[in-house]
Image (spheres, grey):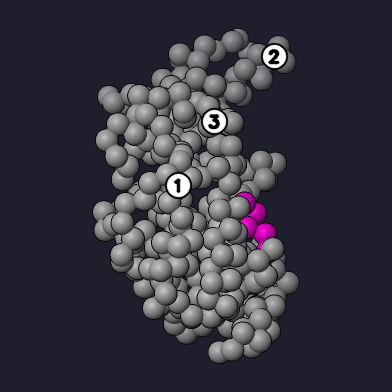
Amino acid sequence: MNQSNLASIGTREPPDPPQQFAVVGINGIGEIVAGDDLLVLVGNAIEDEISAGDIVVVTSKIVSKAEGRSLRADSREDAITAETVRLVASKAHPGGVTRIVQNKLGLVLAAAGVDASNTPDGTVLLLPEDPDASAQALCTGLRRRFGFDLAVLITDTLGRPWRLGQTDLAIGAAGMAVTHDLRGTRDDFDRPMDATITAVADEIAGAANLVLGKTSRRPVAVVHGLGHLIRPIQEPGARTLIRAAEDDLFRLGSAEAHLEGFQEGFAAGQRSPVESSSITDGGATA
């Protein structure tokens, strides 16, 4: 498909999803250290696989390493605190306290995204400072290098309310639509769709993780067959996937919400005060 055709289909949503797509894990990228040029390293690794309309999926871990977002492990708790905007929930366990927080990027996740896995002994990694900007820089450079339109997703692993286990989600994006908004369309029984917005960037991130894994030393994948999602480089990034606080029905953990309700009631003169230490299940410290 030539670039002009790709650009034309990139301006509208297809009437139906594609029947198939493919995700290919890319080998050949070694250990990344601060100052490494990801544009060169990723570009060299995907050169024989990439084509117009593809999506390059990059784990946040190598972006953080290249951007020098490493800290000493003994400063992890301080780093979590520094990256935290709001405590959502906390729970004491034999190894310490798990904190679910909203971080500076607006993401709600464990430990503010400060991670000790797949990083040299004695160090931890912060998430990229601005994943959308990192994705845009990489996407711009790769488009320039290869001479056609493609997209870049930066992913990280997060847990989810109500569900066991983790999956990868998009925390940075450039050059693609991150959602497919079905509101205003009609279903198979001609009923209007009023609420459905498909988070396609997150779906792609989860699919890519199936070939990337956590111990494969394979931090990059190329996704073929989703060229209809390609957009201009200025398309809003993954930050737009974050639900606004006023629309979030689950802003607090159950123990924190319980405590907040008692405190608000006390302030209104309706209840006795409740000490945070009496909320034993959540270990609330907010």
Q: Amino acid at mark 1?
A: Gly
Label 3 neighbourhood size at 10 Å, few (<14), some (14-19), many (20+)? many
Residue 204 drawn at (x, y percent): 47, 66
**3D distance between C-alphas at marks 1 and 3:** 26 Å
Of labels 2 and 3, earlier in sequence is: 3
Residue type, numbered disc 3: Thr
Is residue 254 visible to us here? no
Q: Which residue is mark 3?
A: 84
Q: Are marks 2 and 3 in contact (CB under 8 Å)?
A: no
Q: Tag 1's secondary structure?
A: loop
* Pointer 1 residue: 35
Q: Residue at x 43, y 51 (%)?
A: 36
- Count residues near mark 1 (Cα–Cα under 10 Å), then give few for <14, some for 14-19, many for 20+: few
Q: Which element is circle 2 on?
A: helix
Q: Position of residue 208 (x, y in %)?
A: 40, 65
- Type of amino acid at the residue the image marks with label 2: Ala
Q: Which residue is at the front of the view, 112 or 173?
A: 173
Residue appearing at x 52%, y 11% in the figure:
275
Q: Crowding at label 2, few (<14), some or many (≥20) Cα neighbours within 10 Å?
A: few
Which corner quadrant of the image does residue 178 belong to? bottom right
Labelled disc at residue 267: 2
Q: On screen, 248 above or below 266?
A: below
| Quarter containing the C terminus | top right
Question: Would residue 1 be found to the left or right of residue 4 on screen?
Answer: left
Q: x%, y% of residue 184?
A: 73, 72
Q: Earlier in the sequence, mark 1 or mark 2?
A: 1
Q: Position of residue 135 (x, y in %)?
A: 55, 57
Q: Nearer the viewer, mark 1 or mark 3?
A: 1
Tell me the magenta residue range: 235-240
